Amino acid sequence: MSDTHAQTVAFVRDTMLPEQPPPASEAGVIKWMRENLFKGWFNSILTLLSIFFIYKIVSGAYPWFANGIWNTSSLAECREMLDGMTGACFSVLTERWNQLLFGFTYPTEAYWRPTLAVVLLLVAIAPVLYPKAPRKLMLFTAIYPFLAFWLIWGGTLLTPLMVLVGLIAGYFAFKKFERQSFAMGMLAGLVATVVVIWAGGVIPAAMPDVLALQAIPSRDLGGFMLNMILGTVCVSLSLPLGIMLALGRQSSMPIIKWMCVVFIEFIRGVPLITLLFVANVVLAYFFPPGSNIDLVLRVIIMITMFSSAYIAEVIRGGLAALPRGQYEAGDSLGLDYAQSMRFIILPQALKISIPGIVNVAVGLFKDTTLVSVISMFDLVGMIRGPILASTEWNGVYWELWGFAVFVFFIVCFSISKYSQWLERQLATDHR
Amino acid sequence: MSTISDPPSGSFQLSMLINDTRYRSYTFQFIALILLILAFAYLGYNLLANLQAAGLNISYKFLGEPAGYDINQTLIDYTSQSSHWRASLVGVLNTLLVAFLGCIMATVIGVVVGVLRLSNNWLVRQLMSIYVEIFRNVPVLIWILIIMAVFIAVLPQPRDFRGEDATASMVFGAFAFTGRGFYSPAPVFGPGSGVVVAVFLASIAGIFAFRNYAKKALYDRGQLIPTLWPSLAIFFIPAILAFFVMGRPITLDLPSLQGFNFQGGIFMRNSLIALWFALSIYTAAFIAENVRAGILAVSKGQTEAAASLGLRPGRIMNLVVLPQALRVIIPPLISQYLNLTKNSSLAIAVGYMDLTGTLGGITLNQTGRAIEAIFLLMLFYLAISLAISAIMNVYNNAVKLKER
């Protein structure tokens, strides 16, 4: 043993050292910023660029918003008030809000009707959108289309009522004959519906003033209301059509399959705008001579065809994603085609295709702005036409387009957020 | 001993058409066919009756008649004396032009945004998702009209470039951004420029040859030859050398202000640019999502496996992640191209003369041949989308996972 250690005092630590706080660069905000904003020179440059970009936008847009003028009646007056300052003339929105929302020929005293229809729409789609909503509301959902038609187009309540009665008669006929076969039930239901509607058609014609609202021709519809109407009507009509087309395309019967394939591929291959041209100038040639179908209806027909082809493709994806065992299970239980589709295949396939269907719905809702090209005055048509062309507001671009962007963004963004929520709700498989 | 007996082969009864599964599908198809024929006969009858009432007929002779209108942006020679057929051809080329430009720009923006959305920089990630959400959720028609409004309301008119106290000036003395459109220099090919172009094309071929050689060297002998710098050198040096050796045959024709407008150079009309930019940024938002999904679809294990083999990050990206991500990205990417091409028909909203503007717009209005014009219009778009889906099928079959 050397002497070195002879002099050292034995030392054993018997207490813990006090905990030290982590270095400043490894904790809290600084750590977060170091890892998320300034990790490496490239990231730092990106961060600085982004901050500069945000600063530019905010510094440009803030005075424009803050100095915004809300209560003038023309652009010249607004410019006068601004007196050379940067500022928005939001007064175009306060003065023309009714035109932007309802179009310029919809009677002012009837504005409550589409507004009520929108509020009721929220009630009516609640049971469809939220599985937890009370089931009894479904009854209201079934009535809603007729109510909305009456509210928006006016006329006597008896007209939509007769159609409703016809459909109810059809439903009971279907129930009665469904025992024999599904096709038989459908046929009976269809016949009953047509007969009742046709026979009952005399009632509204005889009593046009019972429970009547002021009738409004559909060429008076306009503004954002028109986008909403086209969007909701066409999506809801194209769902059943899309399901039928998808089933037809999966069918083992060659003629039916090829009819569906040709229809779907044709519609998906052409732009919507050509279909709207068809609605505008060609479709009238295919109706019986002398009949006068109005433009909104023709547009609804074409947009419904358009979206049903897309929805059919989405649903076909859902059908193809189901394992073969599900089809075989249906067969082995002795269910016929209609039963196995209704009770086994479609509930699962539709569940898988919900995100896709919502995507199509959002796309379709955005595409309703294209009707402005065939000189219908939807929101975009109103901005481009009557408002920007008026002497008072000629030259107000950003406020109007900003409004359009805002409205569409709110609607489409919330629909897609809803679809993501629903997807999580429906994810019942355990991963 | 049991035998399987044949099904009773009784005589055919009419009720078997409905109740026997062997015949039922024929019955249904027969009914469907009859209904289809009846529907078409009904529509055709109505069409003929309506045409007769209006004193019209179906004829494509109008395509040969002089069009009588001017088109402000053409790729081929066209005057107002040219035929409607020629006008439609101009429209087809304009559609293809804007679709081509749009696809390139949308891909570039979309890939950059898609990659940046996965960046570990929080701020950039947020900005990019705001971009994607805003552009995806607002109709493309509104974007087209907004960009057109920038041209009308923000950019200076050519007259603002004039005089001593000009309020606007050209960028680098070569580019002018005006409300009427963009002016940029145009190359003028003088005598001898063919050699320069040929050398340039040859050097591009050379790059591919060199890269192939490098790959072969790597696979055969394990020899790693750097490719980036030599490729750049092959790209630039021979062409520049040839340019000076031939005595600078290619010159630039700069746009210059003459009178109230710019003359010379390449002129891109505001409607073309509005359509091009709007379609690009709109489609790019969708492409960004596809790219992001494609990269996320490659499982982390792949990256880790490659890293454990000792590959460097760049090579992991090139050799392992990208080939697998592309398999997921390309099919939706192609269908986005198809959407962009179809959306280019919105040109009519800003007055860009694509096929919808010429054949479906002015020609239709002038001749009144609605059915024929719209039929041809649909046929064109249908041909394009069928061609693109054919390409997509070929690609899908080529990259399909070869399972054993």
Image (cartoon, coloured by chain):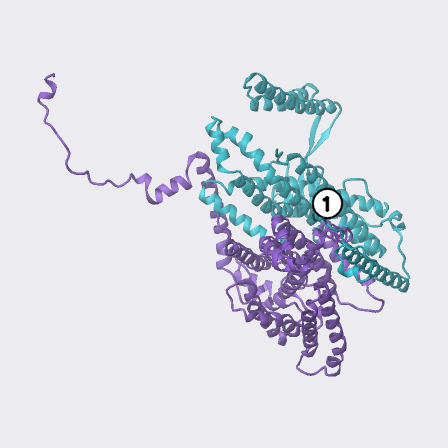
Q: Can the viewer see residue B218 in this picture?
A: yes
- Residue sticking out furthest to the front: B1
Instruction: Tell me where residue B133 appears, x and y as whole percent.
Output: 54, 51
Residue A246 pos. (x, y %): 68, 54
Q: In the picture shown, does residue B371 fall above or below A181?
A: above
Q: How many labels does the image show?
A: 1
In the image, A374 versus B41, the foreground residue is: B41
Label 1 Cα crowd, 10 Å radius (few <14 / some 14-19 / many 20+): many
**What is the display colour for chain B?**
cyan
Task: Please tell me whether mark 1 sits on a helix, a strand or a loop.
Answer: helix
In the image, what residue type sits under mark 1? Ser
- The x and y percentages for residue A109 are 62, 76
- In this figure, which residue is indicated by the disc labeled 1? B385
For chain A, give the colour: purple
Q: B66 or B318, which lies in front?
A: B318
The percent coordinates of residue B340 (x first, y second) are 67, 46
Classify the position of the N terminus of chain A by image quarter. top left
Res. A170 image quadrant = bottom right
Q: Which chain carries label 1?
A: B
Out of A282 and B309, give the one closest to the viewer: B309
**Left or right placement of residue A64 versus residue A214 in this view:** left
Q: Is residue B73 left or right of residue A43?
A: right
Q: Note whether residue B358 is visible.
A: no
Give left or right: position of A180 versus B42: left
Above or below — where is B226 with respect to A294?
A: above
B22 over B91 or under it: above or below: below
In depth, the one of B193 and B48 nearer the eye is B48
